[in-house]
Image (spheres, grey):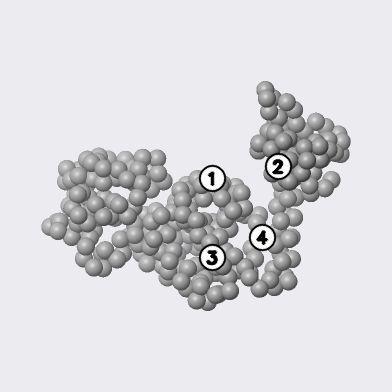
Amino acid sequence: MEIREIASLAKLATNGSILETARLCNLSSGAVHKHLKSLEAEFDTKLYEKHNRTLRLTPAGKFVLPFLKEVLSQREAAVKALSDWKRAPHGVVRVGAGAAFTSTVLPLILKRFRHRFPEVALYVEVGNRDDLIKGLEDGLLDLTFELDYGTQQHSDLAPVATWSAPLNFIAAASRRRGRCTMKELESAPFISYASGSRIEAIIQHYFDECRFRPRVVMRSDSAAAIIAMVKDGVGVSMAFLYAVHAELRTGQIRTISVDMPPLMARMSLIKLRSSYTPRALGAFIELTQSMALPCMKLERV
């Protein structure tokens, strides 16, 4: 059994085509076919079959695939470990995060890291949760910041640091009352996050528990746009305190206290559980764990 044979089967499992597998593996279709038949001969069982116009793994192929993927993962880890052992002069840390976190807290981490490790290149990808998780799984990212990791079930993902962070009602500084009941707040125009987003789901769950029905007048997938609308007095909203830290400090926005317990969410820095952690990546994780982040409390992992 060779690594190339395992890689061919793993690629075939995702695209269902020998031609596409050959393209992805930079091989001829004949070579891929030979790899697959060699694996079948070694296991003495059929690993794939025709299905409509594509190919798919047989039950036996699906059963053995996780074990073969682990072989690929360990091989990649060995390559990275050896490269690290040779003390390669340059490393790279690839981090994913949502837009609000990227524009507020992440720059503090990056600035500190660049100061301490100027020889390490940093790559940041901003996107939605599903794309960033896929980036981790595909090996395109090393780490990503995940909102409310505790509610998710990902056996392949592991948190390396977790923080609790409050979400508060916010309003323009011109709003006179800084305290009211949730019922009184229902009459105020409310600016919500886009339906289907992770933060909207977390806030809606909190609203359901509080039996709060906001009068939604606008939805946006941009935290920056929502904060700008709140500053202009268009309505009230909810936001992580770290996202409005500057506006609170300069008096452009105020928080509203209500008669219910505050909403606390969790932010985790996660990585693939089985992936190797080179020195540069380990240094980034250690620095992040040791930093005091604004309006966030580090929890034990």
The answer for how far apart the CA atoms under marks 2 and 1 are is 33 Å
Q: Are marks 2 and 4 in contact (CB under 8 Å)?
A: no
Q: Residue at x 64, y 63 (%)?
A: 277
Where residue 60 appears, x then y in whole percent?
75, 33
- Label 3–label 2 contact, CB within 8 A: no
- Amino acid type for the residue under numbered disc 3: Leu
Q: Which residue is mark 4?
A: 276
Residue named by callout 2: 23
Q: Which residue is mark 3?
A: 122
Spatial separation of the CA atoms under disc 3 and disc 2: 30 Å
**Disc 1, SS:** loop
Residue 112 locus on image (x, y percent):
47, 73
Q: State whether residue 274 is above or below residue 93.
A: above
Which mark is in front, 3 or 2? 2
Q: Residues within 10 Å of mark 2 (few under 14, many from 20)?
A: few
Say which amino acid is labelled 1. Gln
Q: Amino acid at mark 4?
A: Tyr
Q: Is residue 199 left or right of residue 276?
A: left
Q: CA distance from mark 2 to mark 4?
A: 27 Å
